[in-house]
Image: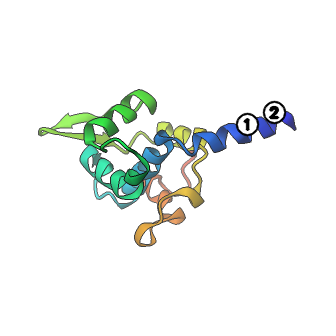
Amino acid sequence: KLAAAYHSDIMADRGMTVEAQVLQVIVHLAAKAKGPNIRLSDIAETFKRHFGRDYERQVTPRWIGRVIRQKLHLSPHKSEGVYDLSIMERQQLEMLLERYGITDATILDEEGVGADELELIFEPGEDRGH
């Protein structure tokens, strides 16, 4: 029981970090994406809109890119002069969602996008490593 309570506390702490917030934004934008990539500038703008007032520092695509690369260990790539993040790394995104305790209930719920939209990233019935 003690180990389960400790694990629960760690998950709750992780859920309040900048990494978890960036991950929520990534999942939110991935659910609305029309292609396999989302722009870092879009991630930064959405992050700023939802969480920017919680930070004293300026939210920039460069800072968000650093969080994505160094903290989440995802690899944005440059395409036609713009940094993009592939949302096709399903297994890695699933692992991060689990690690940071991000559930359907914690996905951003802007304009009705919420729990059920997460499934758009993954093929229905696809084994996601559970």
Could you tell me which residue is drawn at 56 percent across and 55 percent down? 125
What amino acid type is highlighted by mark number 1?
Answer: His
- Expressed as whole percent of the image width and height from the top left, the position of residue 95 reads 55, 38
Q: Can you tell which quarter of the image residue 23 is in? A: top left
Image position of 18 with respect to 34: above or below: above
- Quarter of the picture containing the N terminus is top right
**For residue 107, side relative to residue 12 (left or right):** left
Viewer-nearest residue: 50 or 120: 50
**Can you identify the residue that label 1 sits on?**
7
Taking the image as shown, residue 9 lies to the left or right of residue 23, namely right
Which image quadrant for residue 129?
top right
Side of 130 where 20 appears, left or right:
left
Question: Around disc 2, counting alpha carbons within 10 Å, would you say few (fewer than 14), some (14 to 19), or many (20 or more)?
Answer: few
Q: Residue at x 41, y 39 (%)?
A: 89
Residue on which the image places disc 2: 3
Q: Which residue: 53% across, 39% down?
A: 96
Query: Which coloring applies here?
Result: rainbow
| Few, some or many residues within 10 Å of mark 1 (<14, 14–19, 20+) | few
- Residue at left offset 28%, top offset 44%: 40
* Residue ranking furthest to the front: 56
Q: Are marks 1 and 2 in contact (CB under 8 Å)?
A: yes
Disc 2 residue type? Ala
Q: Does dot 1 land on a helix, a strand or a loop? A: helix
Label 1 vs label 2: CA separation?
A: 6 Å
At mark 2, the secondary structure is helix
Of residue 58 and residue 110, the one placed in the foreground of this image is 58
